[in-house]
Image (cartoon, grey):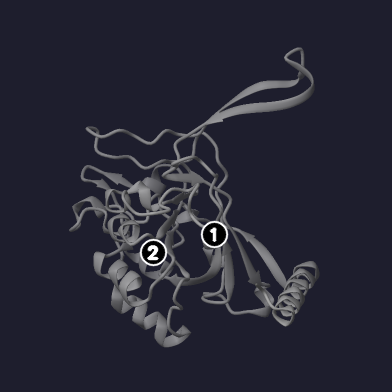
Amino acid sequence: MTSEPTSRAATQLLAMLAQAMASGAVETVDLTHTLDPDFPVLVLPPEFGQCARFRIEQVSAYDERGPGWKWNNFSCSEHTGTHFDAPIHWISGRDLPQNSVDEIPVHNFVGPVCVIDCSAQAGRDEDFELTPDTILEWEAIHGRVPADSWVLMRTDWSKRTGAAYLNMREDGPHSPGPTAAAIRFLVDERDIRGFGTETVGTDAGQGSHYTPPYPAHYYLHGAGRYGLQCLNNLDRLPATGAILIAAPLKIRNGTGSPLRVLALAPRASDAGRA
């Protein structure tokens, strides 16, 4: 049971947060792309099933179909747009406890976040790889990645649109992402909660050719960790010090979900950026 002094301290902290948000000292940053039918989705080899794009259909709009209201039906894959990957999404995590979006403890949806800025490297090399050395170089400046934190790979890929976002070639998509060694380092040595990217998946575009295929998915979800992809506005976050809010829809046995990803961050004028 929570002691009275602890409860009082927590109440004061929440009041301070509310005041900081009201004053603008802490800003709410939207890390989500708008869901619309044109937003690109992951394309797998043709022999596999494919991710469904977002579709929306008007039901009524203050007319004979419903004179006093407007609403729509929509459909999409669990992995369309800015979305969350649960451990059950991958074969390596299929037998873990609390592995679907409806069973994940809700406190895991809110937590600290580190942003590793790889935008310059990704600007020069569309197949840039995040490696353990990249992470160690970041830590030499910003400190050790704290346990149970989110790590986001900033590449500014979210600024691309249309065909340039998927960046398809004859051998498949080309986009930056982590190596298998980087993900294993973050999971095994830094005990992260999850990993996120601005690209269409947590893996590099050529991740199907890695060993194992799609190593970010394989190692993250096999360890019971989470993924975020198609993130936006990572250039508005500091390297450390922000809090991520990423709560998926509560879909029974859901493998993932589109979601609105938010970050609470010091106002840009009050903190350095990644």
Of marks 1 and 2, the one in the foreground: 1
The number of discs equals 2
Q: Are marks 1 and 2 in contact (CB under 8 Å)?
A: no
Q: Position of residue 60 (x, y in %)?
A: 70, 20
Kindly tell me whether residue 154 is visible in this rendering.
no
Q: Which residue is mark 1?
A: 109
Kindly tell me whether residue 52 is visible in this rendering.
yes
Quadrant hosting residue 58: top right
Please determine whether, in this image, residue 199 is positioned above or below residue 58: below
Q: Secondary structure at mark 1?
A: helix
Quadrant hosting residue 192: bottom left
Q: Residues within 10 Å of mark 2 (few under 14, many from 20)?
A: some
Please determine whether, in this image, residue 263 is positioned above or below residue 206: below
Residue 114 relative to residue 94: left or right: right
Q: Secondary structure at mark 2?
A: helix
What residue sits 43% from the left and 53% below the top?
98
Residue 2 relative to residue 241: left or right: right
Q: Earlier in the sequence, mark 1 or mark 2?
A: 1
Q: Position of residue 212 (x, y in %)?
A: 19, 57
Q: Which mark is residue 123?
A: 2
Residue 200 relative to residue 12: left or right: left
Amino acid of disc 2? Gly
Amino acid of disc 1? Phe
What residue sits 44% from the left and 86% below the top?
141
